[in-house]
Every structure is written in structure tokens, then in C-alpha cells.
Amino acid sequence: MLITILTFNLNYVYSQDGWVIQPSGTTVNLHSVNFDHATSNRAWVCGNSGTILHTSNAGTNWIKQVTGTTNDLYGIACKEDNGSVIAVGEGGTVLRTTNQGSTWVNIPTPTTRTLRDISDWRFYAVGDSGTILFTTSGGVTALQR
């Protein structure tokens, strides 16, 4: 009787594609990432202490943005048709840029509750205690539902 033993070297079964660590240049906790749907090279990340990072080369380099806030940010979204990027966070914070992060504007909101996430199509933000905010102006103003 002939017994054949097959062995596999897992390095050959699985490719080297997978999760790769990309240095962010920060040590704060990061909470959200959103890629621009028009190009896979451009993405935005937000986190604690008002941190927003931007890449235009698919994450090879992350550039820290000057946001003007120290509030923690929990959600970020971009809208390709008008170039807006909006981040939301602690204390009802809403920040908006329309120039790839050169300047960030604080948008007044009708809440002080922490906002946890934002959709990237219609700019609906959700947060603590059932808070839902939306905008009909591309993020220039915020309304509460």
C-alpha cells in the first residue's frame, strides 16, 4: 500500500496580499476612515484631540490637518460631487472643508451631544441620545431631526 503525504507551505497557498500597517504619524486613537469614491488614492481619517489625517497616495503618506478643535472626532465623510469633507464628534462638533483640508470651518449645530458617525452621501450625522442631524446645504448648515 502506498501512502502519499501532501504538505503545503502556507506561504505559497496564501498570497502576501492582506492587511498592511501604514504609519499614520500620530499616536492618538483614530475612529473613522472614508475613501473618496472618485479615486482610491484619496482618503480621510479622524480621531481624538481634533485629529484629521489626509492621504492623496493611497495611504503611503498621511498628512495631519489643522482643524482648529481639540474635540474628539468620531466620523468623517466626503462627497465627491462638491468636494466637501465633513467630520463630526464630541459636543456636536461638525467641521467642513471644501479645499482638500487647507482650511476647516466649524459649522454651528443645534446640539451639544456627541456625534458618532456621518453618512457619505446625504450627510446625515448620528450621535448620543438618539441625535440625528442632516443638512440640505452640502454641510454649510445643520438641522436636527
Image (tube, rainbow, N blue to C red):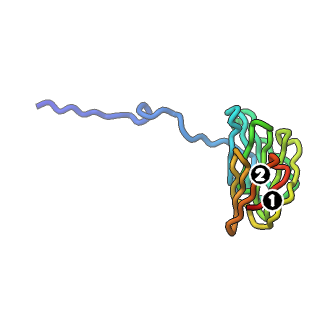
Question: Disc 1 to disc 2, how far (Cα)?
Answer: 8 Å
Quadrant containing the N terminus in the rendered view: top left
The disc at residue 87 is: 2
Q: Is residue 66 left or right of residue 24?
A: right
Residue in front for this viewpoint, 119 or 5: 119
Q: Hey, which quadrant is residue 59 in on the image?
A: top right
Residue in front for this viewpoint, 66 or 11: 66
Q: Identify the secondary structure beneath mark 1.
A: strand
Quadrant containing the C terminus in the rendered view: bottom right
Q: Residue at x 42, y 31 (%)?
A: 12
Upstream in the sequence, badge 1 or badge 2? 2
Q: Identify the secondary structure beneath mark 2.
A: strand
| Residue 68 image point, x, y percent | 88, 54
Q: Residue at x 53, y 34 (%)?
A: 17
| Residue 135 image point, x, y percent | 78, 52
The residue under label 1 is: 93
Q: Is residue 138 above or below residue 80?
A: below
Residue in front for this viewpoint, 131 or 45: 131
Residue type at the position of mark 1: Thr
Residue in front for this viewpoint, 122 or 13: 122
| Residue 62 image point, x, y percent | 75, 41
Q: Residue 65: in sight, yes or no?
A: yes
The disc at residue 81 is: none
Q: Hey, which quadrant is residue 23 in on the image?
A: top right
Residue type at the position of mark 2: Ala
Q: Is residue 88 above or below residue 23?
A: below
Q: Residues within 10 Å of mark 2 (few under 14, many from 20)?
A: many
| Residue 76 image point, x, y percent | 73, 49
Q: Kindly check if marks 1 and 2 are in contact, taking CB atoms under 8 A apart as contact.
A: yes
Q: Residue at x 68, y 51 (%)?
A: 32
Instruction: Single out the residue that lies furthest toward the bottom.
Output: 129
Instruction: Single out the residue that lies furthest toward the left.
Output: 1
